[in-house]
Amino acid sequence: MIVTVCGGKGGVGTSTVALNLAAELDAVLVDADLGMADQPTDGGPTLFDVLAGRVDPLAAVRTEWAVGVLPAGRSLAGARSVEPKALASVLESLAETYEHVIVDAPAGFAADTALPIVAADCCVLVTTPDPATLADTVRTRSLARELGTDLGAIVLNRADRTRESVTETLGGPQFAVPETAAIHEAQAAGLPVSLDDEQNAGHFEPLAGHVRTLARDRRQTET
């Protein structure tokens, strides 16, 4: 199943949620933020090379890392040289090998944001309790609805508890992830918190369990 993790604005923790969700699911993580990539990378092939047809998607996945990652490039020139519309076929190709494909989408409402959402089976919306951020998330929720992509879950990031008002505004099941130094430090190191700090390892397990259930229900519907 292809799950796109997205938010209405940058800085809400979309990349953190995507990395840790991928780790919990033993999934492949695709950094689809072609302009402002946040996931780890190295000198090897990137999503730019895959979209340009130079490398097979599976060959570009870093399977030796803590989480299997298909990183995006860091060059704006590279971003301009690729065909973003090819992303859907890349994700579908990965989904033939991996049970779960987690996509870290760019923030905002431009075309490069819409493509990872429309290519997904469902999306996970990431927001914070801040009213301005919630307002932007409502717009992203509307975009997903217009594109026909199901809402899989809401992640209320940097919050100790879920809030009924958020569910009423956005719909869908909600999961709270507290703000901790361990999560921040693990992300800065390019690692899921489960590998960096065992005491904080459980913060993303409920979300991952919910996604597993969605995937199972989807398989049963398709058979």
Image (cartoon, grey):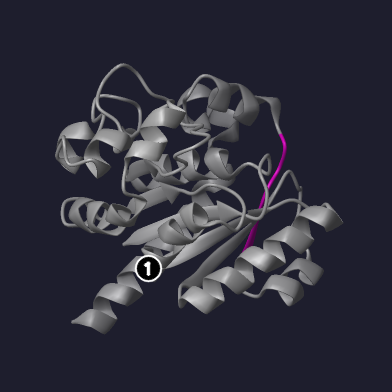
Prevailing secondary structure class for the magenta stretch in the rendered image: strand
| Image coordinates for residue 65, horizontal then vertical, percent | 31, 25
Q: Nearer the viewer, residue 49 or 164?
A: 49
| Image coordinates for residue 44, horizontal then vertical, percent | 26, 21
On screen, residue 191 above or below 13: above
On screen, residue 85 above or below 83: below
Quadrant location of residue 203? top right
On screen, residue 131 above or below 11: below
Q: Nearer the viewer, residue 223 or 130?
A: 130
| Image coordinates for residue 220, horizontal then vertical, percent | 26, 79
| Image coordinates for residue 197, horizontal then vertical, percent | 55, 25
Q: Is 2 inside the magenta-drawn segment?
A: no
On screen, residue 182 above or below 80: above
Please tell me which residue is depicted at 45% across the width and 26% down the height of the picture: 195
Please tell me which residue is depicted at 54% across the width and 40% down the height of the picture: 15
Please tell me which residue is depicted at 76% across the width and 48% down the height of the picture: 160
Q: How many marks?
A: 1
Please tell me which residue is depicted at 35% across the width and 27% down the height of the picture: 66
Residue 22 makes an appearance in the image: yes
The quadrant of the image that shows the C terminus is: bottom left
Q: Which residues are magenta?
A: 174-179
Q: Is 175 inside the magenta-drawn segment?
A: yes
Question: Which residue in the protein does label 1 denote?
Answer: 121
